[in-house]
Image (cartoon, rainbow, N blue to C red):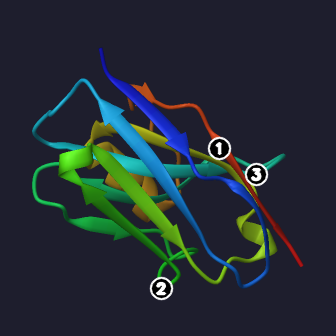
Amino acid sequence: DVQLQASGGGSVQTGESLRLSCAVSGFTFEGYAIGWFRQAPGKEREGISCISVSDGSTYYADSVKGRFTISRDNAKNTVYLQMNSLKPEDTAVYYCAAGPLLLIRRWVLSSREVYGIPYWGEGTLVTVSS
């Protein structure tokens, strides 16, 4: 049974940092990735970063490149999203998900929602105030 649990959200000021965690259990699928997504009120869900389960390759959306860093701790089965230089437009509910690397990477790099990602965790709210 695949499970993902995101945590670490909170309220911060512009320019501050947060680190989100995604605890993953129940799978070690080759060709899969763990992705971070976010959804702001009234907006579509956005893919912002992902990391390959197989080789640790990382990918970022332009909106977060240079500010956010995705990483993994295999011993803890946890994927992190370090978010620096936060802006009010980063305010959203953040989700982690697991699925085929091809699908998640396409979503992150194209900024277009891709269907067929099978495993999602509950979201964690990030609020950035000016």
On the image, the x and y values in percent for residue 105 come to: 33, 55
Give whichever of 103, 73 is nearer the camera.
73
Q: Which mark is residue 40?
A: 3
At label 2, the amino acid type is Gly
Q: Which mark is residue 124?
A: 1
At label 3, the amino acid type is Ala
Q: Secondary structure at mark 3?
A: loop
> Residue at image x 29%, y 14%?
1
Q: Secondary structure at mark 2?
A: loop
Q: CA distance from mark 1 to mark 3?
A: 12 Å
Answer left or right for 58 relative to 121.
left
Give whichever of 99, 67 is nearer the camera.
67
Q: Which residue is mark 2?
A: 66
Q: CA distance from mark 1 to mark 2?
A: 22 Å
Total marks drawn? 3
Q: Secondary structure at mark 1?
A: strand
Q: Is residue 52 above or below residue 100?
A: below
Q: CA distance from mark 2 to mark 3?
A: 21 Å
Packing grade of label 1 (10 A; few <14, some 14-19, many >=20) is: many
Q: Which mark is residue 73?
A: none
> Residue at image x 58%, y 31%?
122
From the image, state whether disc 1 or disc 2 is nearer to you: 1
On the image, the x and y values in percent for residue 96 come to: 47, 43
> Residue at image x 18%, y 48%?
75
On the image, the x and y values in percent for residue 84 come to: 58, 79
Answer left or right for 8 relative to 102.
right
> Residue at image x 40%, y 49%?
35
From the image, state whether disc 1 or disc 3 is nearer to you: 1
Packing grade of label 2 (10 A; few <14, some 14-19, many >=20) is: few
